Image: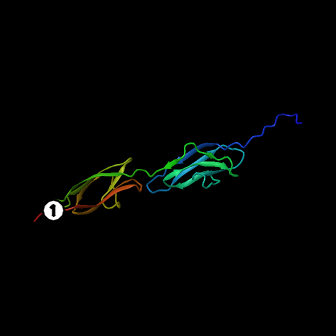
Amino acid sequence: PYSGNPVMVGGPVDPQIVDIIAENISDCGASDGTIDITTTPGVGAVEYSINGGLTYLSDSSFSNLGPGNYDVQVRYLNGSCVVIYRDNPITFEDPAAPVLVALDTLDPTGCTNTDGRISISAVGDRDLLYSIDGGVNFQTSNTFDNLAAGGYHVVVAYAGQACTASQSNITLTNDNVG
């Protein structure tokens, strides 16, 4: 018989998810979200999944992620000791686009006059830029003065962002009836 210290036999220690840093996508339609998973060292090498365990990778950093839900899991390379992140899912959403609330127009007073105006009312969660040429040129003011009769395509956007609101077919006509 063995007379030394008692021998304890147990199963492997589960890997532990210590921290997750998730950076949401930066712009509408972008796929630049990231998830970084930090685990405690266990008894072996760990692999990582962000799709609920459908696939695992040896890298703990995931990038180029688009909108959607991500279910984090980790396990040992041999497939044992699956640990599911308690705060699943991690959700990435497109940032809210600006909302075009109203347009106020004033038609030019004559055929060749350029005294028309378009005033744009919009809301967003950061500073807005305004355009009346389909987004080619933007300005910080929501009012466009000195306009001639013609068609305009209003776009409201965030600086450097793809999130926009727009309305086309805004037509200023002259007031001359003759």
- Left or right: 132 with respect to 31? left
Residue at the spot x=70%, y=52% of the render? Answer: 78
Q: 178 above or below 25?
A: below
Residue that sits furthest to the left in the current view: 178
Query: Quadrant location of residue 178?
Result: bottom left
Label 1: few (<14), some (14–19) or many (≥20) C-alpha neighbours in 10 Å: some
Query: Quadrant location of residue 7?
Result: top right
- Left or right: 88 with respect to 4? left
Residue at the spot x=45%, y=57% of the render? Answer: 29
Residue 105 point in image, percent of width and height: 22, 55
**Which image quarter holds the N terminus?**
top right
158 or 114: nearer the viewer = 158
Tell me, yes or no, if residue 169 can be seen here: yes
Residue 107 point in image, percent of width and height: 19, 58
Tell me, yes or no, if residue 141 can be seen here: no
Q: 11 above or below 171?
A: above
Residue that sits furthest to the right in the current view: 1
Number of numbered tags placed on the structure image: 1
Residue 14 point in image, percent of width and height: 68, 43
Identify the image's colour scheme: rainbow, by chain, secondary structure or one colour.
Answer: rainbow
Q: Secondary structure at mark 1?
A: loop
Q: Amino acid at mark 1?
A: Gly
Residue at the spot x=50%, y=48% of the render? Answer: 91
The residue to which callout 1 is attached is 110
Residue 117 point in image, percent of width and height: 23, 56
- Left or right: 48 with respect to 166? right
Residue that sits furthest to the front in the current view: 1
Q: 153 above or below 48?
A: below
